Structures are given as C-alpha cells and as structure tokens.
Image (cartoon, grey):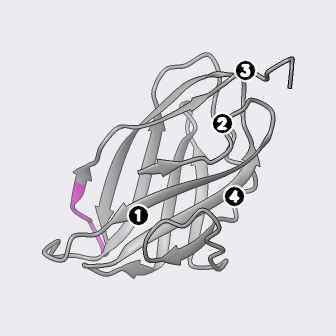
Amino acid sequence: MIHNPEATEGLHNRTTITVVVSEDAGNALGMIVLRQLPNLDQWVWGRLEPRVYLGDYSLRGKGARGLATALVSGPEEDLSIKFNPAIEPGQTVNVVFRGFNPQSSIYQWSTELMADGEDPIRYLGPTLRLNVYEQDPYR
C-alpha cells in the first residue's frame, strides 16, 4: 500500500509505503523495487533517508533512520528500498519519505518484492496509485 496524507501539488508530503509480510511467507523481505508507470512527471521521493517503523500504518508514525537504504537508479528512476535487518514473516513494515508533491496527476508504480539473501526469489506485487490534485485558487 502507499499513503500520502497531503494530496495537493507543491505541498510537503509524507509518502509512506506499507508492506505486510505474510506469516506463511517462508522468507524474510529483503528489498522492494518501485517502478513508476509512464507519466509526464516523475514522483519526487525527497531525501533518500527513509524512516522505518514496524506495525500498522499510522498517520503520525515516526520511525527510525538506518533500518533501510533507498536508491533511485536507471533511466526510469526505479526506487529500490533495502531493509537492514530484513523484515520477518508476520511483520508489517512502513517506509516513510518526506518531500514535496509534484504536479497534479495520477501516479502509479509497479512493485517487486525480493526475499532476503543471495540470488533472492522475486515476487511481483500490486500496482500502487496516488492522486495529486491542483491547488485550489480560492483556498
């Protein structure tokens, strides 16, 4: 899941990616890769120093630094998030990025989840979607 409580273009955001690792997953979650689907604008992830917290999503969840590293790479600006330590089966992880919302549009990403370890098993995850709306000139 992806959450962004502030959905107006140009405003500060607190984009949170939430992953529930099933109790019967069999492997810990080592990494997530998000690939933005075609759009006129790229999503701006802000500083790539995400905060991470375990448990259900919380609007004000703080998290701690150093539990995940994030890297934007390639021509499509894929976002790779690597967990250290890996997220064990039965846990829910939330990765929080702070930045600014881009121009109004619908932003979508394909997701890939990778098990921890060498030569990891790769799973295709759901498509994530966020709407960003124009500023209200009468506000």
Asked if 126 appears above or below 122 in the picture, the reply is above
- For the residue pair 34 and 20, the one nearer the viewer reads as 20
Q: Is residue 23 magenta?
A: no
The residue that disc 1 covers is 31
The residue drawn where x is 41% and y is 51% is 1
Return the x and y of residue 4 as percentages of the image width and height.
Answer: 60, 47
Left or right position of 56 against 97: left
The residue that disc 2 covers is 7
Return the x and y of residue 3 as percentages of the image width and height.
Answer: 53, 49
- For the residue pair 107 and 112, the one nearer the viewer reads as 107
Asked if 78 appears above or below 83 in the picture, the reply is above
The residue that disc 4 covers is 48
Left or right position of 7 against 123: right
- Mark 1 vs mark 2, CA separation in Å: 27 Å
Point out the frontmost of discs 4 and 2.
2
Looking at numbered disc 3 in the image, what kind of residue is underneath it? Glu
Please provide the residue range marked out in magenta.
117-122
